[in-house]
Image: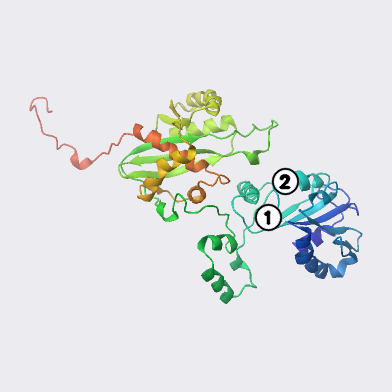
Amino acid sequence: MAVWLICEAMKTHSRNGLPLTVEHEVLYIAPTFQQAHNVFWPKLRKLAEPVTAKLLENPGILYLTNGRRIRLVGMDNPDAARGATASAIGFDEYADMPDRAWEEIAQPMLMITEGPAMFIGTPKGKNHFFKLYAHAEDTPGGDWESFHFTSFDNPFLSDSESDRLQRDMGSDKQRQELEAEFTAHEGVVFKREWFKESPDEPDDGGWAIAVDLAGFRPAKGTAGRDIKRLDETAIAIVKVHRRGWWVKEIRHGQWDTRETANRIIRAAKEHQTGVVGIEKGALSNAVQPYLQDFMAQYQRWVHVVPLTHGNQRKTDRIVWALQGRAEKGRIVLNPGRWAEKLISQAMDFPDPRAKDDLLDALAYIDQMAGRVSYVQYDPAQENKHPVLDPVSGW
């Protein structure tokens, strides 16, 4: 972080071509000013010594030889940062800051320069840091990038210390502190070992598709709200057979209304099913006209079954539909990234801060399973039926 901030402060122009002057600060932001001063300030002073012109110790301001400055800010006094124009901002232990630190306070300071920001920290549950990381992870190639490093990647951590930490820490704490995983209430409802994975599709059974709709992403070329706050639409594609459910895939994403309808009908066409369950409500009504359009385009006519919560809370409905089946090994997942995400959501459930879109869609399969016919063709049984009429042959 310190090296990155120094490099940013040495730049003469922003990425949009704006000449950078002494008025364009580089900020280091920590949960408290005292933390910034005690932990980061000594490192910054040492690393920046060859290019340092002046130090202001108490306010934590370092002037470089090019006239530009790096300033420490603590989110215990967020108003100290307001009104500044920044060319780059680094957040340290972002999970320990208020969620408005970025959107309300820091982001406006970068508007003129279109400068970069870096967020680092140890996960603290599924809070605003998790949401920001998940957004960056789900939008590769855009304005965001995500990086994940564990304590075991640290070359300065000895093997003996690593072994001691693993021995003394509980598994949940180890996943958070050492493996840098975003965890919540692991194991409250579901256990990780309940979810078996296999790429082998069962021979018997039939396909069921259930859709949990989320707020639709604005269509391309139209103004709309920030999509980071939207949940994801999830399309669960499951083969229901005599021994349970084989979950082939749960397709998920933030799509506009037309794209959502397109993906639903394509899934029905690919799996040769004429019935799809969609969560009942205003979102279902919005997607209906587009479903009709794509049915005509793909020549695949689908009966839409309205899925309901049955006057149950979402938590109760998911538990009722999935917990027993998962525990008894009656839910098997086709391996893939979507499966990893589903298991992650199951481990966090029912934490209200964590997402459960994929779990919700899978739970709706419970309402669709009764519409699947368990038909299996067995060539060994062919021509073994007794002949009742020797003339007609049957």
At 76% across and 51% down in the image, what residue appears?
A: 116
Residue 58 screen position, x and y as percent: 87, 63
Please give left or right for residue 181 compared with residue 56 in the image.
Answer: left
Residue 265 screen position, x and y as percent: 48, 31
Colour theme: rainbow
Disc 2 marks a residue whose amino acid type is: Arg
At 59% across and 68% down in the image, what residue appears?
A: 152
Residue 354 screen position, x and y as percent: 56, 46
Give the number of callouts: 2
At 62% across and 58% down in the image, what residue appears?
A: 148
Within 10 Å of the Cα at label 1, are there few (<14), some (14-19), or many (20+) other Cα atoms? Answer: some
In this orientation, does residue 270 appear?
no
Give the quarter of the figure containing the N terminus: bottom right
Q: Secondary structure at mark 2?
A: helix
From this view, report whether residue 266 is shown above or below residue 27.
above
* Separation of marks 1 and 2 at Cα, in angstroms: 12 Å
Q: Residue furthest bottom?
A: 160
Within 10 Å of the Cα at label 2, are there few (<14), some (14-19), or many (20+) other Cα atoms? Answer: few
Q: Which mark is residue 96?
A: 1
Q: Secondary structure at mark 1?
A: helix
The residue carrying mark 2 is: 100
Q: Residue furthest left?
A: 390
In this orientation, does residue 216 appear?
yes
